[in-house]
Amino acid sequence: MALIVQKFGGTSVGSVKRIAQVADKIKKFQDAGNHLVVVLSAMSGETNRLLNLAKAISGDEQPLPRELDVILSTGEQVTIALLAIALNKRSVPAVSYTGSQVSILTDSAYTKARILRIDDRKIRTDLQAGRVVVVAGFQGMDEQGNITTLGRGGSDTTGVALAAALKADECQIYTDVDGVYTTDPRVVSAAQRMDKITFEEMLEMASLGSKVLQIRAVEFAGKYSVPLRVLHSFKEGPGTLITIDEEESMEQPIISGIAFNRDEAKLTIRGVPDTPGVAFKILGPISGANIEVDMIVQNVSHDNTTDFTFTIHRNEYDAAELILQNTASKISAREVIGDIKIAKVSIVGVGMRSHAGVASRMFEVLAKEGINIQMISTSEIKVSVVIEEKYLELAVRTLHTAFKQDAPVQQCE
Amino acid sequence: MALIVQKFGGTSVGSVKRIAQVADKIKKFQDAGNHLVVVLSAMSGETNRLLNLAKAISGDEQPLPRELDVILSTGEQVTIALLAIALNKRSVPAVSYTGSQVSILTDSAYTKARILRIDDRKIRTDLQAGRVVVVAGFQGMDEQGNITTLGRGGSDTTGVALAAALKADECQIYTDVDGVYTTDPRVVSAAQRMDKITFEEMLEMASLGSKVLQIRAVEFAGKYSVPLRVLHSFKEGPGTLITIDEEESMEQPIISGIAFNRDEAKLTIRGVPDTPGVAFKILGPISGANIEVDMIVQNVSHDNTTDFTFTIHRNEYDAAELILQNTASKISAREVIGDIKIAKVSIVGVGMRSHAGVASRMFEVLAKEGINIQMISTSEIKVSVVIEEKYLELAVRTLHTAFKQDAPVQQCE
């Protein structure tokens, strides 16, 4: 008898009909003899509706974060009770709990709270009594009993945190895709669903734009070794298991997936006097303006000056450029140049740790197609390049063919 | 510096614009130096929307009461936070609390819970710090931390219970009328707003169909001697104060108001063998079917048989008649007759305690207009009669003229 935590997102519970379908699905798992804890998001659209109410009342100011959380947390409170009603109607004993009721204790950082601990006694008692426990995702309470929310996508984190606290056998995240793919199937028709992927690989895939799971939830799952499975809410299938899998790594293909991102823009400050602390002088004002920086490349210096390039979200290009121009005149740099028509392509895989030549093969494949590489950044299990945006699809398709289609050949290299 | 509990109903917080108006109003009270606790209902229509969701998912079954309360309680949770945001925007420090958060402890009778006690420490701390405390009406939690609701109109009860726990100087109930009237102004244009009325009178008026306040809230206020004031949400005015007022009763007019009700129907079982326990044999099956009985009249027996008449809500006439026919054959009664075209008119006033002849004057006034009285029922501060429905308006107008317009004369009788 397994203990499974299942999380269903907003579109999976987006209507009364959908909630009924979810109830049918849960009944099957219950009938198969599993202990079940179900985590739900708000009905799709509901969080935005509530947010708009709060914005309408606060006018040009930001709504008070504490009160915003009181409002937003009602979304999940409705879906958990609706599902509990639907389950009981199907003769599946079920009980709903808000984040406060099962003591999902968080810090007091309203709208982006972090889970500190979970009191699992109530849930264990219900599970022992044969009840399905339905918990509101995305929310908790702080030490003073104030309602908090975990920020967008926080329901995944609630699911993983509950699975960790209960030492569940698996945490299943139900979504609108049937698993994690080797790359985006809309770009490469040969993209394949992976049966397994490691936490590290998933983190690199997620942060690079494969938006199946919240990064935070994957980190959490990795930290507490919670086996995480991504599945489709309404289609049958094994999905993709995200797990620690060290002993099998010898058999793994070199790379597991190809991720890409076309939301970024590039800024370069040239002719920077190469003195200690110059990197902070350049990036300090950028992060001070709450602009997130992704790739950072600094070339070796030449004539005591250096070039410094970084990428940011495309939406923040104008703001970042203004700040950088300001910095350039302060530190007597030569010029600021930038480009928003770029794309980032990455190959990800724990297998590349033990295989030399993955990066060079990637560069070779791109060169053969005449694709110029503008920036390179590497980690232990990832190589990312920035290229001109118009070559994105070509690059992804070519790399997928080179690394995935002929995977057996690659392993024999 | 007064401590005031203010309760605003669903239409008063029915839109973002209305909530902003309520915030403006509260700011004035706060600026005048009062300590304020504000109790809110859900936005008008919201409770029904939530109820319909629950009904849609439960189909032909009743939604599980525990889960229904989890859903319904979200309505107030949204309005309290919206008001807290609006107040803070107006530089009025304010904080919102759900029923659970301020420990409005109830029994576990979901959908119709009763308040057991309130832990007022959190509220007192906030009031001391100069904050307006905004509390969700209609809801609480039981000893086990389950969310409960108090049933329709429960927000009035929350307001009174908080006022009692905090020993507030006044509990103000804001509504869509500017006070309690001597009778319905739509029927009698000369109806007047009363400045004051006693709890007992208000109870009789409320239960007789003057739907300004929930009976339960008035009982609660009377029990704990909480001065209760009914006011209009958006019109200025003193409203009506409901209070204990023994010392002033000598100056009070004999009757304070005229109430009426056209929702009732009448059933008579005739020729009932007059044996001990026969009243229970007749009414037991009726109340067993959850049908509420209002007036009950049994005439003196004649030839060892008696007639037994009672009134019920008109919607339950068919069900009650069926039960009564069944009873009639069991106890060998002669026949069952009934009438749905009736109306009840009552005169209410603590003044009538010390004045003989109020009932006979009432009968005289009605007789002069040719209105036949079908049933009579009296209490210490009320005389009710059942008449043919078509005479209702005439009866109310005539009685109002007789008892209220010439009130000074009445007092000298």
Image (cartoon, coloured by chain):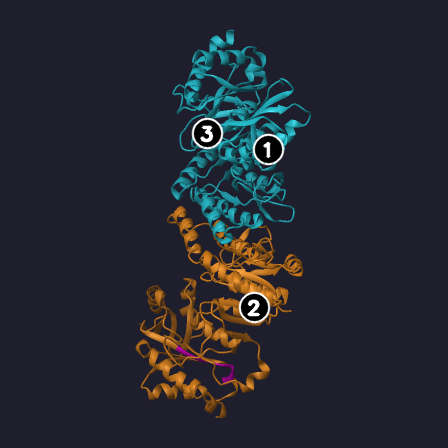
Chain colours: A cyan, B orange
Query: Do the numbered discs 3 and 1 sit on residues whose CB atoms are within 8 Å?
Result: no
Where residue A28 appears, as percent x and y from the top left, is 44, 34
Read off the residue under disc 3: A231
A180 in magenta: no
Q: Residue at x 65, y 27 (%)?
A: A278
Badge 2 sits on which subunit? B
Mark 1 residue element: helix
Please tell me which residue lies in front, B121 or A103: B121
| Disc marking residue B207 | none
B346 in magenta: yes
What segment is highlighted magenta in the picture?
B345-352
- The amino acid type of the residue labelled 3 equals Leu
Within 10 Å of the Cα at label 1, are there few (<14), some (14-19), or many (20+) other Cα atoms? many
The first of marks 3 and 1 along the sequence is: 1
Residue B250, relative to residue A262: is it above or below?
below
Mark 3 residue element: strand
- The amino acid type of the residue labelled 1 equals Ala
Q: Horizontal placement of B36 versus B268: left or right?
A: right
| Disc marking residue B171 | 2
Please tell me which residue lies in front, A318 or B298: A318
